[in-house]
Image (cartoon, rainbow, N blue to C red):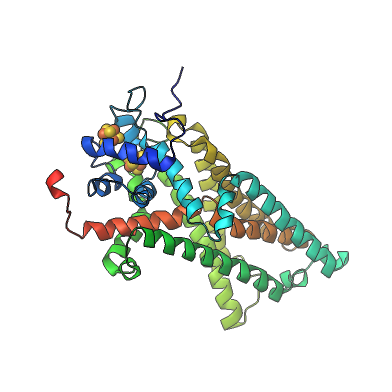
Amino acid sequence: MPITEHKVVVGATPHAEGDRIMQICNACRYCEGFCAVFPAMARRLTFTEADVSYLANLCHNCGACYYACQYAPPHEFMVNVPRTFAEVRKETYKNYAWPRALGGLYEWNGIATALVTTLAVCAFLIGVMQTVSPGVLWGTHTGAGSFYKVIAHNTMVAIFGAAFLFVVLAFVMGFRRFWADMDENLSDFASGASFGEAMWNVLTLKYLDGGGEGCTYPDEKPSFTRRTFHHFTFYGFMLCFAATSVGTFKHYLLGWIAPYSLGSLTVILGSLGGIGLLIGPVGLLYLKHSADPMLKDKNQRGMDDGFLMLLFLTSLTGFLLLFFRETTWMGMLLTIHLGVVLGLFLMLPYGKFAHAVYRFAALVRFAIERRRPNTNASFD
Ligand code: SF4
Ligand code: SF4
């Protein structure tokens, strides 16, 4: 029978288990060259809750240390760093959520994502049906401003501007508390070299290269598949964001009104990003479902799946809108697409996207620490 459990102390909190495992790893140090977690761990002799959160957010769940570990199950030490740290990360997201009361959404994130997105789509549908006639909704509109005949530009700006500000505020508040708990100064976060190093590690997904051979995910065989699909997803998201920014620039500074031509920079960026968001999330979903269960926290399946499916749906509805924007389906497709995008926005601070904020903060701190003398050097 395959081993699927690893807890030695039944009912131990994820942070307590993380502390226990780090004590063992700190005595062993076999995995020191695998990723940023182990050099960061080696700078400490004891692990506070904030330390465990920090180390957990440095972990990319690549599985290398689990497969290399002589103390992994069935050994009585039951060391399983990737799964324990996955559990700790969820606690981090909950603890630092803003407003705090919404931290509970991480516990039932899959259902919450489906519910919020459905409600957002319904709200857009009801809003449109209340404000425009069926003739306008199902009419054929072409040329500049055709979208705004169905939903006024100012209405879109008000809804998405408010949602965007809320998302930014939620992440800034969470980040500030996380950073303060690690006893770091805000001024150090923005220091050029450390920030630049962390940014480079994010852009290249350095810690999913397994030291050059690829990471051991979804199984023991090293591969770059996960990093490739993550790149599709990440850069797809960034290209879509760039397309929206270019569109905003054109609207307000050049007075060019959407929709834009197929050859325009906005549509090219959005289409390339959309392709990334079709390929990346499907690939990551496949890998997640075929991954070794020992690496995963099964309670986070809804959160992982919900976020990836929402990214996929955002891209799919965007492409449908692009293909059918000069037909009678434009009004309905625009309404559904905006509802899905709003659902994605509203759930960003309470789902898988949170890993981007806390992992980046942890990577910046790691880069800062690397530039400081190691006070535990005598134990190396
Ligand atoms: S994961 Fe296992 S092998 Fe690696 S440092 Fe920890 S105890 Fe040692
Ligand atoms: S699972 Fe990978 S990233 Fe996480 S601690 Fe182990 S080796 Fe490092």
> Horizontally, is 89 left or right of 351 in the view?
left
Image location (x, y in percent) of residue 168: 52, 66
Which quarter shows the C terminus?
top left
Q: Residue at x 49, y 62 (%)?
A: 171
Image spot of residue 11 (x, y percent): 47, 33
* Rendered residue at 20%/60% (across/down): 372
Residue 224 visible in image: no
User: Which of these two is toward me, 312 or 349?
Assistant: 349
Q: Nearer the viewer, residue 237 or 41?
A: 41
The residue lying toward the viewer, choosing from 140 and 63, is 63
- Kindly indicate the quadrant of the structure image that contains residue 190: bottom left
Q: Where ligand 2 lies, by image quadrant?
A: top left
Determine the residue located farthest toward the top in the rendered image. 1
Q: Residue at x 58, y 74 (%)?
A: 248
Above or below residue 101? Residue 260 is: below
Question: Where residue 71 sits in the image (x, y, percent)?
Answer: 30, 27
Residue 45 in view here: yes
**Residue 256 in the figure: left or right of residue 218:** right
- Left or right of 234: which side holds 123? right
Residue sticking out furthest to the left:
378
Q: Residue 240 occupies which quadrant of the picture?
A: bottom right
Q: Count of labels shown? A: 0
Residue 139: give x, y in percent of width and height.
83, 65
Q: Nearer the viewer, residue 353 or 326?
A: 353
Vertical order, 139 against 74 (above or below): below
Image height check: is 159 above or below 113? below
